[in-house]
Image: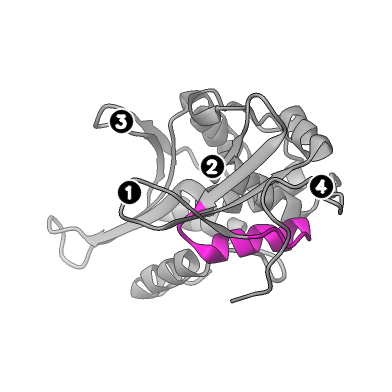
């Protein structure tokens, strides 16, 4: 157990920097996926079943917010960070985050040089990789990079932003079940191209279990990040 920070809902004594950096971009990627802005106050919430995810957020904003249990009807034990900050709340609005954002989220105004740090935060929030041996062809190992969202506007902006920076096209698929998320998918060659950019640079912040899964997946085809 790490040291406890301030109680949820307090007005942050330490101002969260609004100067763009790799860590701030990653934190905003987490908030764009796992975060929530209250509609009637300046409360900011980040919820995850991974404690490391919330600890990473604290590292990125350089404030030791308290991590607490969240009551949930699901079987998984969710954790959360909650805090109030008028300045940071307004900053998040200015870059494109919205209250009750699940279906209203659109483009995020992230500087080009920090885009892939933001994308890594989005991936750690609502992304995954999927791999399997294709039975139709001998020794054919397939893998995909996937980003999920309930907002088609956000996913289409993300697809165009990735294409602009990598040439990777990807494709958006609709939900297969009612109220399910849409998915932006990249197959083998394109996914490897994006993943290498997402994890480039010295000591990036990331969710360990997702990076480990990627490394194990790529090792099967003799590739690495």
Q: Is residue 35 visible?
A: yes
Q: Position of residue 23 (x, y in %)?
A: 73, 57
- According to the image, label 3 marks what residue? 175
Q: Residues within 10 Å of mark 3 (few under 14, many from 20)?
A: some
Q: Position of residue 41 (x, y in %)?
A: 70, 29
- According to the image, label 1 marks what residue? 74
Q: CA distance from mark 3 to mark 1?
A: 21 Å
Q: Secondary structure at mark 2?
A: helix
Q: CA distance from mark 2 to mark 1?
A: 19 Å
Magenta-colored stretch includes residue 51: yes
* Residue at image coords 53%, 58%: 195
Q: Residues within 10 Å of mark 2 (few under 14, many from 20)?
A: many
What is the number of callouts on the image? Answer: 4
Q: Is residue 68 placed above or below 110 in the rendered structure?
A: below
Q: Secondary structure at mark 3?
A: loop
Q: Residues within 10 Å of mark 1 (few under 14, many from 20)?
A: few
């Amino acid at each position: 157990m790490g040291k406890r920070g301030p109680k949820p809902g307090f007005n942050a004594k330490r101002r969260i920097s609004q100067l763009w950096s790799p860590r701030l971009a990653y934190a905003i990627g987490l908030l764009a996926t796992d975060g929530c802005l209250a509609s009637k106050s300046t409360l900011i919430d980040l919820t995850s079943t991974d404690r490391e995810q919330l600890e990473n957020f604290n590292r990125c904003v350089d404030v030791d917010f308290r991590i607490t249990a969240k009551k949930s009807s699901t079987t998984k034990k969710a954790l959360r960070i909650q805090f109030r900050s008028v300045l940071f709340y307004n900053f998040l609005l200015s870059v494109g985050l919205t209250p009750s954002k699940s279906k209203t989220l659109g483009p995020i105004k992230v500087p080009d040089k920090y885009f892939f740090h933001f994308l890594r935060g989005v991936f750690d929030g609502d992304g995954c990789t999927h791999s399997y041996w294709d039975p139709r062809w001998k020794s054919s190992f397939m893998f995909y990079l996937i980003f999920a969202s309930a907002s088609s506007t956000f996913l289409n902006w993300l697809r165009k932003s990735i294409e602009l920076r990598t040439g990777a096209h990807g494709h958006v698929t609709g939900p297969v079940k009612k109220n399910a998320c849409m998915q932006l998918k990249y197959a083998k060659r394109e996914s490897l191209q994006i993943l290498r950019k997402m994890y480039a640079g010295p000591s990036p912040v990331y969710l360990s279990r997702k990076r480990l899964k990627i490394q194990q997946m790529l090792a099967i085809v003799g590739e690495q990040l």
